[in-house]
Image (spheres, rainbow, N blue to C red):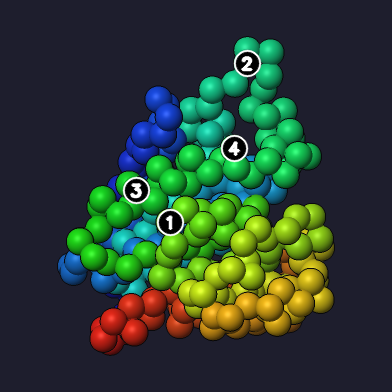
Amino acid sequence: MTKAIVEENVWIPTGGREVEGVLAYPESEPPRRGVLLLSPHPHMGGRMDNNVIEHLARRFAEDACGVLRFNYGGVGKSELEIPEAQSPYEYWVEIEAAKGYDAVLPDAVAARAFLVGALPSGVPVAYVGYSFGCCLAMLLAQVHPPESIAAISPPLREAALVGLEDLTVPVCFVAGDNDFVFDRKRLEASLAAMSGRTEFVELDGCDHFFRKQEERIYQVLRPTVVAVAASKGEVA
């Protein structure tokens, strides 16, 4: 039976501006863990209503998680401070061209702080990044280590996952077998250098966008994300 959830529209303060988000949580019980969702690049469907992000948000909330998804600056109603002569589209072109993902890190830090403040004290938090969001999750992990990380379609043909080899928390990777930005050999080389628990699942018949395949992703990620507190004595 599907459990009832609540979805609240929220505003997250970050650097004198605000970004919009949606906080989801179970209706009849307090969240037992938190999940921060980090979307793809805005030019690759990177919105909080992305098919994968929206599906995961609701499914994790049904699984007793407090889940926050949000729009990056310049996306939807999220505010962005840029020169008058520059458009949000051009801003995001520059971010990707320079691989300047640090510029988006303050939004992720602010979103994590908002999520932690909305959860019961001591609840563990996992990061779930999709494509560009994988890169951002790795950067955020260096500032605020999570209990676990899930990386969907890491764009290894386009960018490196900074700090990946230094992670000691459980990490689950999932990608389609027809994903144009994923590089299996590069990931396997990185996994060999990692000391923490890792898992990689390749989904057959899937490309980078996973249309109508969202539930398959959830089922792969659930053991890592929902069970992040198992080592603390909780029953997942």
Dot label at residue 83: 2
Asked if residue 130 shows in the view, the reply is no
Alpha-carbon distance for marks 4 and 2?
Answer: 15 Å
* SS for callout 3: helix
Which of the marked residues, 4 or 1, is nearer the chain's N terminus?
Answer: 4
Q: Which residue is mark 4?
A: 103
Tell me if 202 is positioned left or right of 25 in this view: right
Mark 1 burial class by Cα count in 10 Å: few <14, some 14-19, many 20+: few
Residue 230 placed where, x, y %? 33, 84
Between label 2 and label 1, give the one nearer the viewer. 1
Which of the marked residues, 2 or 1, is nearer the chain's N terminus?
Answer: 2
Alpha-carbon distance for marks 3 and 4?
Answer: 17 Å
Q: Quadrant of the C terminus?
A: bottom left
Q: Please, what is the three-letter code of the amino acid marked with disc 2?
A: Pro
Tell me if 40 is positioned left or right of 33 in this view: right
Dot label at residue 144: 1
What's the residue at 34%, 74% (across, down)?
Answer: 63
Residue 149 placed where, x, y %? 51, 68
* SS for callout 4: helix
Which of the marked residues, 3 or 4, is nearer the chain's N terminus?
Answer: 4
Q: Is residue 236 above or below residue 102?
A: below
